[in-house]
Image (cartoon, rainbow, N blue to C red):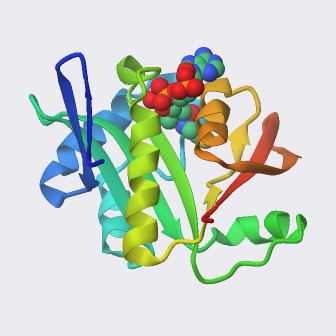
Amino acid sequence: MHQYQKNNIKVHFGLFEMKDLDNLILFLENLSTESKKRFGPHPFTKETILELFNLDDYLLFTAKTQAEKTIIAYTVVKKGWLDFEHQRLNSYGLNMRPGDFTIAPSVADNWQGMGIGSTFLEYVIHFLSKNLQMKRLILWGGVQRDNERAVRLYQKQGFRVLGHFEYHGLNTDMIFEME
Ligand SMILES: CC(C)(COP(=O)(O)OP(=O)(O)OC[C@H]1O[C@@H](n2cnc3c(N)ncnc32)[C@H](O)[C@@H]1OP(=O)(O)O)[C@@H](O)C(=O)NCCC(=O)NCCS
């Protein structure tokens, strides 16, 4: 569960550790323009990572190759909802409650489409439900409607569509609810 293994490649999932700060910045900076258009929950600076790391309501997760310890995927999670999303989420008849979390995942370009994002998402959901009593998971800023791989990833995991909104194109809000 904490590991992805395929074709002799082993990837380890876990909470971000401060010793990997430079490694994480490198991962973020190296994302392609295309991936950065899809994933940009916060500025990709050391200051931001340090700040989020020290805030109680944020959790940072990484996926590292076992061989080189390179970060190849990163997920940021916020307890509750982001301030600017309340109004939109409320418009679907949703009200924030304990057990709500918000998620934004990313996988390095060279590693996309290999199943790593799926295994990573399963790991994070398992971690949050087991350790932090997560009941519902919301997408950070929704998902761009033309981001087919991400939409497929969320559907496969059991997320359902809440609604759509316009922001630099069409976006979809989705939610995952524990049974
Ligand atoms: C979205 C993202 C996290 C998914 O991770 P990933 O490791 O690439 O995804 P996976 O390989 O696990 O694939 C997920 C599903 O999408 C499918 N898929 C892969 N490429 C696809 C494509 N071009 N179109 C549609 N579906 C696709 C996969 O087949 C898989 O479904 P399956 O298991 O039923 O076959 C990753 O691609 C990424 O970081 N993209 C850029 C940033 C981003 O979009 N973040 C999300 C913002 S909401």
- Judged left or right of residue 46, residue 42 is right
Residue ID at (68%, 52%) = 141
Residue closer to the observer: 51 or 143: 143
Residue 107 appears in the figure: no
The answer to which quarter of the image holds residue 26 is top left
Q: Position of residue 102 (x, y in %)?
A: 58, 62
Residue ID at (57%, 77%) = 99
- Judged left or right of residue 138, residue 130 is left
Up-down relation of residue 140 to residue 65 (above or below): below
Q: Position of residue 116 (x, y in %)?
A: 39, 32
Residue ID at (40%, 39%) = 119
Residue closer to the observer: 137 or 130: 130
Residue closer to the observer: 66 or 85: 66
Up-down relation of residue 151 to residue 142 (above or below): above
Q: Position of residue 86 (x, y in %)?
A: 76, 71
Quarter of the image with the C terminus in it: bottom right
